Image (spheres, helix red, strand yellow):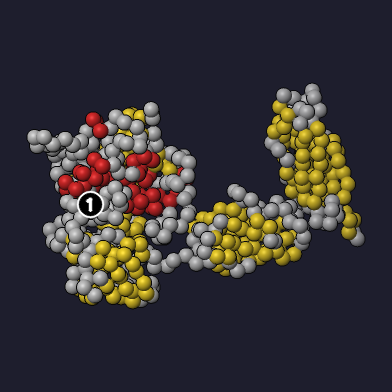
């Protein structure tokens, strides 16, 4: 039996009275209603099917998903996870299949007020105590806010859970936002894969709450009804998908005159921006030709008939990803030995899955896409001086080639493990000038003295000496002898370059290593 973490509570705070609805004679159900619903009109409280995400989440795990998803275009990390949470309740979702759809309105610039339909993180304290994971504040019909408590670790998925699941917990809280109360406990005693999304406590990390159950769908239908046979439904989109471009929406059930609503990240609920009003349909309500407004953004497009009808959300990618483009690589000169962090700037870099330096792919963890315009990687040790190419690859293609120059390592640099064990091989690598003489020093105190403009280990032992190779690279390896356990020692490389006027001496960084038993 799946362990149920009943101490982790999914919260709802409604300004209106929250009470269970009593079923009529002979009716068995477990869902409960809050007593409100989200409208699609332009009067009174205005349009309320919209929601947006303020991505202020502090956990790295809440924003480590950089995988492009055409169903949720231009959204990554926490934003994509919470958008998916709203999609769990969509009319096109097989398990939902009711007359309801959320309208994703992109990223917000702040957590907003309690009636701006915004999902955001919130610091610990206050409501975020007693095991509360997240909560919704109403009164629903006039707008709401959802807060995710930052005293918990959050995970955006997909992949192995590294914290509480934003998508699953988000689906629960958005269920409150559309008008559902907590499911009765009688429907929350099974395994994670059978319990309702609207159960008051979460199973494991909440990933199973991503999928709504029949009781959740029944509650959704009790509020919004079944899908009507003439519900406007978008099935396709084609045309010039750029601001000011003309597109064609195809589908069924379009009235002769409709509004077409795009994601625009606005919180305005009366005559919201990103909307084309009075668009005409043709082909018996199967086609709409419309010009994309300048304030439209990537997200979704919906056909809106502002009485009671709203279509399914259809993915709308205003700027679909293309192949990565490199405009700059910095620094332009990189030490041939462990040259450090290199920054690539350009476009469409967030989806990069491979970086090649001098034709060789970097290993996992050696490069990090930061955002669409920035990527960093750790320069590998070079195999030749001079210009080397940098090429980035994603699912959308391969970039042009950028480049940087490998140069001598100056000042010298030493690398070695911070811990070792007796009887274990101990390896040191270092770099400096091409073919320079080197001396590998060791002492047991870390003390130094000034020598020819350098700070050099005092009372040193020379453990190895010789000449570096033409790239200025060298290495040393010994088996750590027994009887040295519990000792810390310090190492440094000092190099000499012979010139006409004598010798130029250079000293590397000092590294320390603990010898363990």
Q: Residue at x 73, y 60 (%)?
A: 406
Image mark count: 1
Query: Which quadrant of the structure image shows residue 357?
Result: bottom right
In this image, 418 relative to 20: left or right? right
* Secondary structure category for the residue under label 1: loop
Task: Name the foreground residue: 471 vs 461.
Answer: 471
Does residue 40 sit above or below 488 in this rendering? below
How many other residues sit within 10 Å of disc 1, few (<14), some (14-19) or many (≥20)?
A: many
Relative image position of residue 363 (x, y in whole percent): 64, 50
Q: From where the camera sits, is residue 384 visible?
A: yes
In this image, 458 relative to 284: left or right? right
Q: Quadrant of the C terminus?
A: top right
Relative image position of residue 237 (x, y in whole percent): 34, 69
Q: Residue at x 23, y 30 (%)?
A: 186
Q: Residue at x 31, y 64 (%)?
A: 235
**Among all residues in the image, which is located at the extreme left?**
25
Relative image position of residue 454 (x, y in whole percent): 77, 47
Task: Name the foreground residue: 335 vs 363.
Answer: 363
Does residue 36 sit above or below 25 in this rendering? below
Residue marked by disc 1 = 98
Q: From where the camera sits, is residue 508 visible?
A: no
Q: Quadrant of the N terminus?
A: top left
Q: Residue at x 30, y 70 (%)?
A: 249
Relative image position of residue 423 (x, y in whole percent): 78, 28
């Amino acid at each position: 039996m799946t362990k149920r973490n009943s101490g982790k509570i999914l919260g709802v705070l409604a300004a209106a009275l929250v009470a269970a609805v009593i079923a009529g004679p002979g009716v068995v159900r477990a869902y409960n209603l809050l007593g409100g619903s989200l409208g699609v009109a332009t009067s009174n409280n205005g349009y309320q099917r919209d929601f947006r995400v303020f991505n202020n989440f502090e956990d790295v795990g809440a924003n480590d998903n950089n995988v492009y998803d055409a169903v949720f275009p231009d959204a990554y990390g926490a934003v994509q996870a919470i958008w998916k949470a709203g999609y769990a309740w969509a009319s096109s979702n097989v398990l939902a299949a009711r007359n309801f759809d959320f309208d994703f309105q992109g990223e917000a610039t702040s957590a907003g007020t309690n009636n701006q339909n915004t999902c955001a993180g919130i610091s610990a304290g206050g409501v975020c105590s007693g095991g509360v994971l997240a909560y919704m504040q109403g009164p629903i019909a006039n707008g709401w806010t959802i807060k995710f408590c930052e005293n918990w670790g959050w995970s955006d998925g997909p992949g192995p859970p590294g914290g509480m699941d934003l998508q699953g917990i988000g689906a629960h809280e958005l269920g409150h936002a559309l008008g559902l109360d907590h499911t009765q406990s009688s429907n929350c005693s099974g395994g994670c894969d059978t319990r309702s999304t609207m159960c008051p406590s979460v199973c494991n990390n909440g990933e199973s709450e991503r999928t709504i159950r029949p009781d959740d769908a029944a509650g959704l239908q009790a509020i919004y009804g079944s899908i009507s046979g003439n519900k406007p439904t978008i099935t396709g989109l084609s045309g010039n998908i750029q601001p000011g471009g003309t597109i064609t929406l195809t589908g069924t059930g379009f009235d002769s005159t409709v509004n077409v609503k795009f994601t625009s990240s606005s919180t305005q609920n009366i005559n919201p921006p990103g909307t084309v009003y009075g668009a005409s349909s043709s082909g018996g309500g199967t086609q709409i030709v419309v010009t994309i407004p300048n304030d439209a953004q990537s997200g979704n497009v919906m056909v809106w008939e502002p009485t009671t009808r709203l279509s399914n959300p259809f993915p709308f990618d205003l700027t679909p990803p293309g192949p990565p483009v490199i405009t700059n690589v910095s620094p332009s000169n990189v030490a041939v030995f462990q040259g450090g962090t290199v920054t690539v700037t350009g476009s469409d870099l967030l989806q990069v899955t491979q970086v090649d330096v001098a034709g060789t792919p970097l290993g996992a963890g050696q490069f990090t896409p930061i955002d669409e315009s920035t990527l960093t990687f750790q320069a590998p040790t070079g195999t030749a001086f001079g210009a080397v190419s940098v090429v980035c690859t994603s699912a959308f293609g391969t970039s042009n080639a950028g480049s940087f120059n490998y140069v001598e390592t100056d000042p010298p640099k030493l690398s070695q493990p911070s811990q070792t064990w007796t009887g274990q091989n101990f390896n040191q690598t270092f770099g400096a000038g091409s073919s320079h003489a080197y001396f590998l020093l060791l002492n047991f105190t870390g003390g130094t003295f000034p020598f020819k403009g350098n700070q050099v280990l005092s009372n040193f032992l020379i453990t190895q000496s010789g000449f570096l190779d033409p790239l200025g690279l060298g290495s040393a390896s010994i088996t750590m002898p027994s009887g040295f356990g519990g000792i810390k020692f310090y190492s440094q490389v000092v190099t000499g370059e012979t010139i006409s006027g004598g010798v130029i001496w250079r000293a590397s960084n000092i590294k320390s290593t603990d010898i363990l038993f």
